[in-house]
Amino acid sequence: IKITEKVKLSIRWKIIIPATLLIIAVCLSMGIYSYYCIQDGMVDMGGEQAATAAKIVTELLDTDTLEDLQPGCEEGKEYQKILQTLREAQENYGIAYLYTLYVKEGTVYYGVDADATDAQCAFGEECETSYEELKDSFEGETYVMDYIDHSEYGDLISVYKPILNSNEEIIGVLGCDYDASEIMEKPST
């Protein structure tokens, strides 16, 4: 009788252990998959928020005045008005960096940069991003980054949106680096 009980116990454990391990593996896989789905959804949501913020900012800009600005205009009333508009939008919409760009002879230059630190780019300062990287935006397409860039500047989702004047001509691009740090915190809370 004891031999049969040992055999039954042994068979029972042979079934329970693999079944338990399988259940743990399935639960772990589902948990990891769910985490990445949530993370992707949060990034998509952040991209939508960034694109909406960029759209609102381009609607707030006096684009005809912006089009007329030239290097060395930083002390002028027109420049200061656009700078103030950008800084208010930056604060109101959770934007880490906000700036305008324009292209001249295949080179990209900064227009009005809302940065309030010493790192602010002057109007007409050459941009480190090449024209080829921004070509689609200068031709009318809005670019929304589909990932969060983790850099020394923070967790950012960048948007490049064409700026149109009153004649619907593209005069530049709005660079909007949306602060995604809150998005990074949400899945873990």
Image (tube, grey):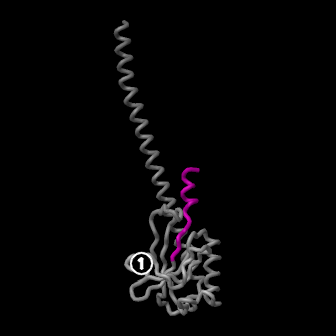
Give how far across and how far down residue 158 sits, in percent.
49, 70
Find residue 66 and report its image quarter: bottom right
The segment highlighted magenta reads 175-189
Q: Secondary structure at mark 1?
A: helix
Give how far across and how far down residue 133 sits, in percent.
39, 76
**Please, is residue 72 above or below residue 134 in the view?**
below
For the residue pair 150 and 60, the one nearer the viewer reads as 150
For the residue pair 57 and 126, the one nearer the viewer reads as 126
Give how far across and how far down residue 5 sits, in percent.
38, 12
Q: Residue at x 47, y 58 (%)?
A: 40
**Please, is residue 152 above or below residue 36 in the view?**
below
Please say whether residue 169 is one of the residues in the magenta stretch. no
The amino acid at mark 1 is Leu
- Apparent side of residue 186 relative to residue 6 in the rendered image (left or right): right
Question: Residue at the front extreme?
Answer: 118
For the residue pair 64 and 68, the one nearer the viewer reads as 68
According to the picture, the residue beneath numbered tag 1 turns out to be: 134
Find residue 6 and report its image quarter: top left
